[in-house]
């Protein structure tokens, strides 16, 4: 059985996600120490704390990698590098976890880098009243043109009729009003920085320097980056992880490249099921589920066994 792994992005995190995670997992303990909290689930019950960039990115990265490591104990095919792993990919902050699974970074260093990434993004966005807006139901070309006209930027391409835009809050408000008048569906996101746009250029350059000091290795599992190209070396890994902070995430191209490797199943690791839903809408013949849908690891194992 060939498996593709997708690592969730920011925005769907909540206190009771991934209920089967071991509270004493080393990565979760590292994360709690890094964030100065005694119990991350209790901290997550404060909505403001949970949505803060500096907290969310570290929590998501640590939980994703802890979940993947626990899953390997039940499903040996998920161990990397394994011929059963057709590809790994991550959405925005999820790309750090994907890089780790691909062998580019150690798990401990990855959690540390998640905190550094968030701090650099917050620093780049300081003094800016920015946000993000999801738009769907119209062509991606129209969304891109509207962004340019309203002074916003296209942050993420999800599909032919779905994207996320970012920029100054007043520009996004005008964009939302205009898009709704044209019949588009709009969803403001609880984000306070303009991720994946030129407003994050200083963070991208600084993060690239951090990555170059982290002893990256070449990936040993196929990994299509958020730029929509395969990563083949340590240098290209550093460039991909940094550049996505200030460039449009090409998630639609990412999915296309994974589909070309013809996985039998796709497993999203993280909270919610946004990536699994996007996948199932586009490639219904290749089933996708998110591990957050299951109450136990046994449930994940049984679902995958039925498709082996």
Image (cartoon, rainbow, N blue to C red):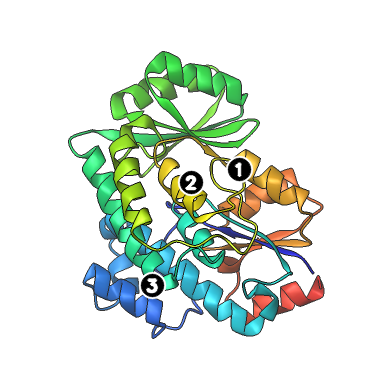
> From this viewpoint, is residue 96 visible?
yes
Residue at 42% from the left image edge and 59% from the top image edge: 13
Judging from the image, what secondary structure is the residue with disc 2 in?
Answer: helix
* Crowdedness near tag 1: few (<14), some (14–19) or many (≥20) residues, C-alpha within 10 Å: some
The answer to whether the residue labelled 3 contacts the one labelled 2, judged by CB atoms less than 8 Å apart, is: no
Q: Nearer the viewer, residue 172 or 265?
A: 265
Q: Which mark is residue 289?
A: none
Q: Is residue 157 above or below residue 221?
A: above
Q: Is residue 174 above or below residue 76?
A: above
The answer to whether the residue labelled 2 contacts the one labelled 1, judged by CB atoms less than 8 Å apart, is: yes
Task: Give the number of callouts.
Answer: 3
Q: Is residue 162 left or right of residue 25?
A: right
- On the image, numbered disc 3 is attached to which residue? 108
- On the image, numbered disc 2 is attached to which residue? 240
- On the image, numbered disc 1 is attached to which residue? 229
Image quadrant occupied by the N terminus: bottom right
Residue 175, position as x, y percentages in the image: 42, 21
Q: Is residue 207 above or below residue 184?
A: below
Judging from the image, what secondary structure is the residue with disc 1 in?
Answer: loop
Q: Nearer the viewer, residue 264 or 204?
A: 204
Residue at 22% from the left image edge and 44% from the top image edge: 123
* Crowdedness near tag 3: few (<14), some (14–19) or many (≥20) residues, C-alpha within 10 Å: some
* Crowdedness near tag 2: few (<14), some (14–19) or many (≥20) residues, C-alpha within 10 Å: many
Judging from the image, what secondary structure is the residue with disc 3 in?
Answer: helix
């Amino acid at each position: 059985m060939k498996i593709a792994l997708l690592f969730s992005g920011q925005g769907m995190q909540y206190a009771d996600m991934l209920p089967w995670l071991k509270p004493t997992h080393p990565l979760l303990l590292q994360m709690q120490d890094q964030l100065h909290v005694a119990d991350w689930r209790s901290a997550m019950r404060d909505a403001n704390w949970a949505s803060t960039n500096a907290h969310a990115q570290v929590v998501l990265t640590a939980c994703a990698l802890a979940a993947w490591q626990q899953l390997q104990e039940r499903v040996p095919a998920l161990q990397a590098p394994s011929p059963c792993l057709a590809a790994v990919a991550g959405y925005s902050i999820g790309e750090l976890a994907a890089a780790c699974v691909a062998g580019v970074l150690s798990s401990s260093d990855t959690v540390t880098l998640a905190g550094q990434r968030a701090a650099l993004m917050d620093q780049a966005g300081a003094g800016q009243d920015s946000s993000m807006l999801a738009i769907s139901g119209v062509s991606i070309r129209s969304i891109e043109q509207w962004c340019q006209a309203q002074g916003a930027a296209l942050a993420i391409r999800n599909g032919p009729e779905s994207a996320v835009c970012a920029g100054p809050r007043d520009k996004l408000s005008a964009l939302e009003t205009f898009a709704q008048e044209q019949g588009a569906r709009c969803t403001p996101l609880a984000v306070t920085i303009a991720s994946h746009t030129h407003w994050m250029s200083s963070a991208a350059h600084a993060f690239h320097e951090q990555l170059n000091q982290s002893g990256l290795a070449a990936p040993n599992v196929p990994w299509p980056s958020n730029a929509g190209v395969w990563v083949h070396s340590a240098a290209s890994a550093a460039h991909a992880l940094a550049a996505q902070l200030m460039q449009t995430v090409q998630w639609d191209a990412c999915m296309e490249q994974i589909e070309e490797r013809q996985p039998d199943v796709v497993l999203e690791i993280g909270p919610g099921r946004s990536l699994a839903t996007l996948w199932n809408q586009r490639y219904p013949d290749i089933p996708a589920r998110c591990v957050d849908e299951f109450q136990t690891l046994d449930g994940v194992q049984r679902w995958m066994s039925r498709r082996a």
